[in-house]
Amino acid sequence: MFKIEKRPIPSGKWNWGAPVVAVLLTMVFGGALFAVLGVNPFLALEKIFYEPLFGEYAFYYRPQLMVKAAPLILIAIGLSLGFRAGIWNIGAEGQYIIGALCGAGLALALYPMELFILLPLMVIAGAIGGALWGLIPAVLKVRFGTNEILVSLMLVYVAEQLLASMALGLMKNPEGMGFPGSRNLQQYPSAHNAEIISGTGMHWGVVAALIAVIFAYIVLSRHMFGFSLRMSGMAPRAARFAGVNPTRMVLICMGISGGLAGMAGLFEIAGPAGQVSIDFNVGYGFTAIIVAFLGRLNPIGILLAGVLMALTYIGGEITQSQMGLPLAAIQVFQGMLLFFLLAMDLLTNYRFRPTAKEAA
Amino acid sequence: MKLIKHLATATMALGVATGAMAAGHGEKTKVGFVYVGPVGDGGWTYEHNEGRLAVEEHFGDQVETVFVESVPEGPDSERVMTQMALEGADLIFTTSFGYMDPTINVASKFPDVKFEHATGYKTADNVSVYSARFYEGRAVQGLIAGNLTESNIIGYIGSYPIPEVIRGINSAYIQAKKVNPDVEFKIVWAYTWFDPAKEADAAKVLIEQGADVILQHTDSTAPQAAAQEAGNVYTFGQASDMIEYAPMPRVSSIIDNWAPYYIERTQAVIDGTWETANTWDGIGAGMVGIGEITDAVPADVKEAALALKDAIASGEVHPFTGPLNKQDGSAWLAEGETADDGTLAGMNFYVEGITGEIPQ
């Protein structure tokens, strides 16, 4: 027989093998689910994974993939830093909203002044807004010992109410005939986070996400701060002996992840979304948590995971409209991905060992 | 714009392709629907989907319909619409207010595709808007509610404080006040169109505050369930008939009936007679239906309600007829004067007698 035994250190091979196996298992079981629903599973999987990348309309879907993946990656990179150090920022969705509100608020206040540095200023405002929102649970944690998971999560709902209030009140479009929603920043040239090269989907948020990936990679592998981060997560006591200040660690991690989430929100509201509206946030802050883990908290992994996640969204829509697959099936499919990944992680941290036969 | 060129080429290529197919198989008109909720919400999206099914049934093989459900308002909806247009949709219904700017954006890229946006106000050469005069149904509800209440407290679950919802509150209040001068409205804002948990909470709060009739402008049946549990509380179905809760607590309902409109517009596309329109139909045109009034309502009240319904349908009675003052006491409509559509469309004030403020 076998027994399950904890590995002394997580298996490097399985660390990267687990996501691959999880994706394959998801395809197998997801395909079975589609088959039960009366849809050709091979066709459905082709529509999800192949069509957006290489299908007839790939010229449209590929840029869209970047638009959809960029905020996920940007947020997930920030979260991964904290997660590595055992600091759990679950409220990126709120920081995303506040960042968007701060940046958009700045633009709406200056409307219709054309100012060539307006967009950069908005990005800074967004980052600061998100960082401050992220620092609330951080300060409460280091000052009063509150749990950052709960506080950051609760602040998401506060941010949502604030967003609704802004869309209905302060930031409402004065020319909108009483309807909720702000002016559309896409029609305000200085504030518009437009595509850098038309038709490529490449807006400044995509650039920021790529920079964040590279930056995080360097920090984690080459910089003392990255080392302190990893040590705090793996061996908090050892980290303290090595001179890592846990208070500072919490503040820095929450601040950075909040700032990146805020920036993601700003890029979204000034670009693809365009408007402060009641339902502006669509869950990027939560999905980014999945992306961070799917990417093994590794910057390159997160980049790939973000694109994979975006692929399931866009491919999922294609299967809906072309094959009549219900949205719930797509959501189950996405859920399976995380489920199998967590299950496969067993192999990363544990190993199966044949138990020695006892002497009769 | 490179993308537009790309898209234009693609649509042209597609046009050629469908044209070629037309020669062989007879041309099928493709109609797309973008839904904000799940088709099983039992309310708003459910009724739009019923309209879609009616189109399929009416035209049979002549028409093919596609839909994508639970599409977030914003860039995601823009992608879904683009995808439908790329895949050859001739007519696309976008069925939520938040799809307004995305619809306009996509429509400008696909001049040959017709778009129909529900409940918005922006039109273009290939974009029509349509909505229903739900407030006419609210008047009938108000009359029944004013008669039924014994505590003289009527609870109202609002979704978002936007003109459409405020119009409904005012319309119901005016009729309720007419039949019961002591009546009082308690309004709770749920800030959602569909969230069974929040809606149930709102209903419970209102019941605790003494409301024995509850009107809702949210789409789930959760308030009905809460009322059933409390006993002796009356409710009305919203958007859909919600007949499963009849005869108590659901005593009547407002039913959105989009089928005639969808069939008419699809026919116009087939005939090549489609033109930009701004449609706002009510009970008379059959877009707003009043669900069966159950025996829980006294016979004389039922008779009065049906009489009001007929009078509104024939245009004899307008739910907003003076003398009416605004909440602050300032004069709005003089004796016999009726509200104009412009004021109704942007309604952002309560009528005199309603307490509380519209959230800003």
Image (tube, rainbow, N blue to C red):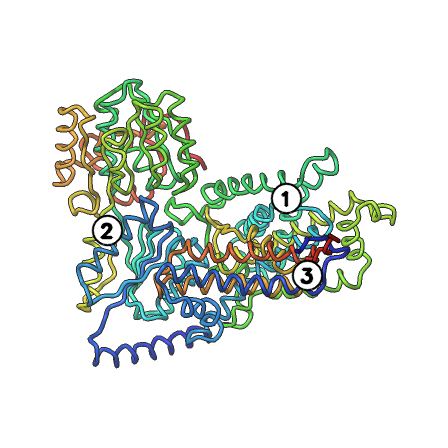
- Which residue in the structure is indicated by mark 2? B258
The residue type indicated by label 2 comes to Trp
Q: Amino acid at mark 1?
A: Trp
The earlier-in-sequence mark between 3 and 1 is 1
Task: Chain letter for mark 3, please.
Answer: A
Look at mark 1 in the image and give the residue it sits on: A133
Image coordinates of residue B155 in percent, x first then y, are 34, 27
- On whether disc 1 and disc 2 are found on a single subunit, the reply is no
In percent of width and height, residue B281 lies at 21, 47
Mark 2, secondary structure of its residue: loop
- Residue corresponding to mark 3: A298
Q: Quadrant of residue B89?
A: bottom left
Instruction: Tell which of A167 and A337 is nearer to you.
Output: A337
Cα–Cα span, label 1 and label 2: 44 Å
| Image quarter of the N terminus of chain A | bottom right
Place of residue B42 in the rendered image (x, y in percent of width and height, measured from the top left): 31, 44
Q: Amino acid at mark 3?
A: Asn
The residue tagged with tag 1: helix, strand or loop? Answer: helix
Name the residue at 22% across, 60% down.
B56
**Quick check: B182 above or below B121?**
above
Instruction: Name the side, left or right, on which A40 lies relative to A253.
Output: left
Query: Residue at the location (46% across, 63% down)?
Result: A314
Q: Residues within 10 Å of mark 1 (few under 14, many from 20)?
A: many
Residue sitting nearer the eye, A214 or A34: A34
Is B230 located above or below residue A282 in the figure? above
